[in-house]
Image (cartoon, rainbow, N blue to C red):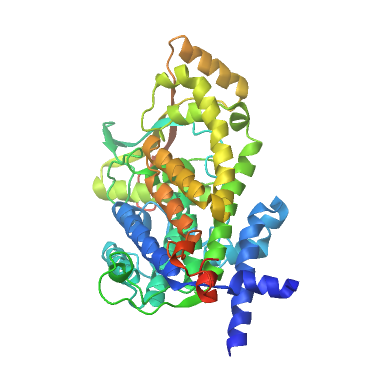
Amino acid sequence: MKTLYGILIVAFASLCAANILVGLAPGSIRSADWLATLRRTTGAEQNWSMFHTIPRIRSLRLRVVATDQEGKKHEFGPALPGLEEIHPHQKIRYYYTFERLFTQGSESYRKPYLNALAQALKKKNPHLVEFSVHLEYDTTHPENTPQEISRLLERIRKGGKSTIEQRNVFGPFPVKNDGPA
Amino acid sequence: MAPLEFYRAIWLKKTDARRYALLRIAFASVILIHIVHLWPYRITLLCSDGIIDPQAASSSGPGLYLSIFALLNSPLAVTIVFLVATLATLLLAWGKLARPMLGILFWLLLSIMQRAPVSASGWDFILINLALILLFSPLGEKWNPRNLLLRRGCGPELQLVPRYGLVLIQLQVFIIYWQTVILRLDNYYWQTGDFMTYFMLSHHSRFPGEWVINWQGLLDMLTYLTLMVELAIPVLLWIPKTRKAGLCLGVAFHLGIAIFGVNLAIFSLVMVITFLAFINPWCPRRSQGMEENPEFQASCS
């Protein structure tokens, strides 16, 4: 019994150690399908890429701007279900969520979010006809090129602003019960 | 020693059960802080009519979708799950039904990760990996904060248990730091030393502002120092003679991150508790005349 217990421990520990050590293996092994399946099921993912490049955003603001039948604009927060305002600087998970939601490759999350937003707006005010999501952020560096970066630092040294304001507008989308098309 | 015997000894060598108890109590405390941190997000991120579509989450990758929030997804149900998890952390810390409680907490962490993958932070991954290791490790459940930390009441008899759980966490610490450094090595901003300047200009900085430009030389050095410290921490912790230095360096490093960074305190705390897998506060010293006792020597391994 004691021997069997020992064998089970060594087998379990070896499997766990192999999974952990694969974190240092080349990408092709790290991203094998069977391993990804096992890791997602158990939560044992090994992707330690914290701050592997610079954070570019100083501040992020999100607004949902809706228009009613008379053309009057109404402003809401982007949080669901109640369209509350969010403060991504204080609540870091909102920053992660919306940054990922509105980057390329996240359409599978973004589309249902916009659908749910359309329904929440309709519930809030049945006279609204369309809406758009406004992402406003101050970024240290809008373009991902080293040359631009050095120029940016030079500009700050000469008394310029350290960040540049950027705006991305998603929409307009129709406000209806089944959300935007 | 034969290779097979040596390999067996890596995992099965005995150690003091109090080391696991200390780690268990620390882990439960951090999970409690994590639950408090997640509380304001529970409706918007985990309920069915929240920001993240349940179907998109369940079909976002390979593997089984085991999130409890697939079944319990109303605001009241999610709140009850959080309250149950809070109770589980308290029982885990106290050593009551420790393994089932750890199972509940592991399921909570997995459920959150699978239900809201776009909201995940780095420390979520660390916590779930620690939970998985601890779930199958000795937990020193006979010890509780009262008899272990406050030394009150009658403590249980000393117990020696296999050290595999601690070794796995040590290995995890190595990989967390080293993979992070390896991935950064081919990044332009880490290579040029600019990283820290931009970090201090970003929303992660507690004191963002143009002032950093005047300190760029120092911040460049700090960028390289960060990489060296991250490489050194697990090595220093692993070698018995440098363990104290590793502990001081690691705690100081993560304290620095928590002070100068915003929203990174939980991450720092999670990393600091992993250091407990390296240390043994109960290792008898030579002056105590315990060196002849092989069982106590084993507990110092």
Q: Residue furthest top?
A: A158
The percent position of residue B170, horizontal first and vertical second, equals: 55, 59
> In which quarter of the view is residue B82 placed?
bottom left
Quarter of the figure with the N terminus of chain A: bottom right
Asked if one can make out residue B55 in the rendered structure from this viewpoint, the answer is no
Identify which residue is drawn at 46% across, 41% down.
B253
Relative to the observer, which residue lies in front, A40 or A129?
A40
Most foreground residue, A12 or A156: A12
Please tell me whether residue B75 is drawn above or below residue A150 in the rendered image. Answer: below
Determine whether, in the image, residue B43 is placed left or right of residue A135: left
Question: Residue B10: percent from the left, percent from the top?
Answer: 63, 69
Q: Position of residue B257 (x, y in %)?
A: 43, 39
Q: Is residue A145 above or below residue A23?
A: above
In the image shown, does A61 or A70 lie closer to the viewer? A61
Residue B31 position (above or below residue A11): above
Residue at 59% from the left image edge and 32% from the top image edge: B190
Q: In front here: B121 or A14? A: A14
**Drawn side of residue B43 relative to residue B196, left or right:** left
**Residue projecting furthest to the bottom:** A1
The quadrant holding residue B13 is bottom right
**Which residue is at a point 58% across and 44% down the rendered structure image?**
B232
Total numbered badges shown on the rendered structure = 0
Task: Give percent across and percent down for residue A164.
Answer: 45, 21
Residue B3 against residue B187 in the figure, above or below: below
Q: Is residue B124 visible?
A: yes
